[in-house]
Amino acid sequence: MKKLVLLIAAGCVSMALAAEAPAIYKKCISCHGVDGKKTSFGNDAIAGMPKATLIEDLKGYRAKTLNRHGKANLMNPNAANLTDEQIEELATYISGLAK
């Protein structure tokens, strides 16, 4: 019973985080998780990364000049159409997530 309660509580927290996330972050969730801590597929946890690093990385993926951990094939298409404003919004949000 305790496990069920914990799962329900975790689900509620995830839903709350997803609701407050900027719309543009929603396409990041499947790989990085609602809280930015998902590390499956060899992803780094992105929660709490420095804003400047996030901006630099997203612009690198957008320009196809970055291939961190061999993930360019996944990140380049996701970053390809991001505007500078969207990159700024994502970096602000992600850097503010708890590590």
Image (cartoon, grey):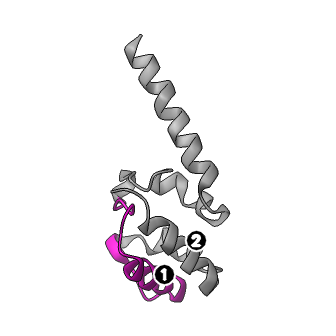
Question: Which residue lies at the image location 55% right of the left edge and 80% below the top edge?
Answer: 88
Q: Which residues are magenta?
A: 43-69
Image side of residue 35 versus residue 39, left or right: right
User: Dividing the image into 4 quarters, which one contains the N terminus?
Assistant: top left
Mark 2 element type: helix
Q: Which amino acid, by three-letter code, is at mark 1?
A: Tyr
* Label placed on residue 61: 1
Seen from this angle, which residue lies furthest top? 1
Mark 1 element type: helix
Question: Residue 97's quadrant in the figure?
Answer: bottom left
Circle 2 crowding by C-alpha within 10 Å: few under 14, some 14–19, many from 20: some
Residue 93 in magenta? no
Q: Nearer the viewer, residue 56 or 66?
A: 56
Residue denoted by label 2: 78
Image side of residue 78 versus residue 46, left or right: right
* Label placed on residue 80: none
Question: Which residue lies at the image location 58% right of the left edge and 43% below the top edge?
Answer: 16
Residue 66 in magenta? yes
Above-or-below relation of 91 to 48: below
Question: Residue 15's quadrant in the figure?
Answer: top right
**Marks 1 and 2: in contact by CB < 8 Å?**
yes
**Residue 35 pos. (x, y %):** 45, 52
**Residue 45 pos. (x, y %):** 35, 59
Above-or-below relation of 66 to 96: below
Above-or-below relation of 79 to 20: below
Q: Which amino acid, by three-letter code, is at mark 2?
A: Asn
**Residue 91 pos. (x, y %):** 49, 74
In three-dimensional space, the C-alpha distance between marks 2 and 1, rounded to whole angstroms, equals 8 Å
